[in-house]
Amino acid sequence: MTMRSASGVRELDRSLGQGKHGLIVLLVASILLFSSLALFVRNYASAESSVATISLGGYPYDIDVNPDTNRVYVMTYNRVESNTSNVFVIDGSTNAVVATIWLGEGGVLGVAVNPNTNKIYVVSNHRDISVIDGSTNTIIKNLERPCGTYPSGMQPSGSIGAIDVAVNPNTNMVYVSCIRATRTISPILGYYQSVGYLAVIDGSTDSVKGNITLGPNTWPEPIGVNPNTNRIYVGDIGTSYTYVIDGNTNLLMGIMNTGCRCQGVGVNPNTNRVYFSNFGSNNVTIVDGTTNTAIGSVTVGSETRSVGVYAAANKIYVANSASQTISVIDDNS
């Protein structure tokens, strides 16, 4: 696995499936052309293994960890009542659920923790950000449509959606993956064109500072941040590519092939390892963040979604949607 320069990239329309954004794309093909050699991913044996399993009442979708309080936050959804979702709060020392936060109807997608402020950011209703006080487990504010809106009277047949959220505690910046999709052929066939970008939020004021554009026909979903290197990893659910962004300049550094259409990205800053969840393969790919090469994989539960990291204990938490469990990986091995 190597990282490719962002320059010289030519993007064509690509065929995409359905991700957190809930938009179904039935047609459109895409090819990324690079000047460098073709790249592939090998499967490596790994000494790392799942060391614990936490059962939940709902289907886990997204996960993050507060290293200061040792609390794990898991967003779940109810497949029977599809508009109802919760955030489970887990004690990382005992793996016991200590609280459940109901965010109302409409569904939630992503969750991220800022340990410096003890704020938990949750993507709700596919467009807004709910901010939770970690000391009281209550919602303290709502950030409406951080991805923006169409001008009044110019709403096309499409939508603007917020998909996932991540925090860099060293810079107090919050990143939201956004998709602006426009239906281009007919409501029945459901063909879309899209523009993917990140909304950048100042965590001290919880206000949007600007956007980082990823390009046309990109469908960004999972986000991972390494606070030590200030690199932001954004997975494209329509391809096996992950975009690497320099958080100091908010510029695209390169594009990395992870070998999977990853549903989750987690970074351990202590080991500089990046964990990518493979939804279809029920495992997690481990990448060396220095060399951007795959160094191992760990088998977990069914339909792996998000990856959360507790760096202080070198624990990796993986949400397994179909298994309704959380796998815990020891990153010390």
Image (cartoon, rainbow, N blue to C red):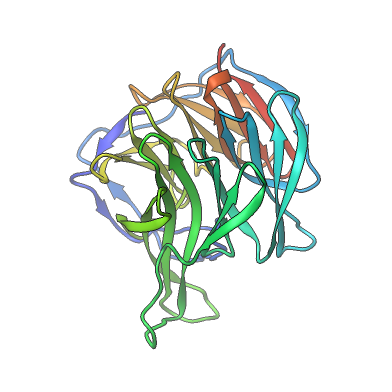
- Report the residue that reaches farthest toward the bottom: 153
Which quadrant is the N terminus positioned in?
Answer: top left
x and y, in percent, of residue 237 in the image: 48, 50
Q: Quadrant of residue 245?
A: top left
x and y, in percent, of residue 53 in the image: 75, 28
Q: What count of labels does the image hold?
A: 0
Task: Determine whether 159 is above or below 139 in the image.
Answer: below
Front residue of 177/284: it is 177
Front residue of 301/132: it is 132
User: Residue at 34% across / 35% down in the picture?
Assistant: 231
Judged left or right of residue 46, residue 103 is right
User: Residue at 41% across / 81% down in the picture?
Assistant: 156
Q: Can residue 318 be seen from the camera position used here?
A: yes
Q: Can residue 214 be seen from the camera position used here?
A: no
Task: Determine whether 302 is above or below 69 in the image.
Answer: below
Front residue of 271/97: it is 97
x and y, in percent, of residue 162 in the image: 48, 60
Judged left or right of residue 53, residue 125 is left
x and y, in percent, of residue 222 in the image: 49, 46
Which quadrant is the C terminus positioned in?
Answer: top right
User: Residue at 39% across / 31% down in the picture?
Assistant: 227
Judged left or right of residue 16, residue 35 is left
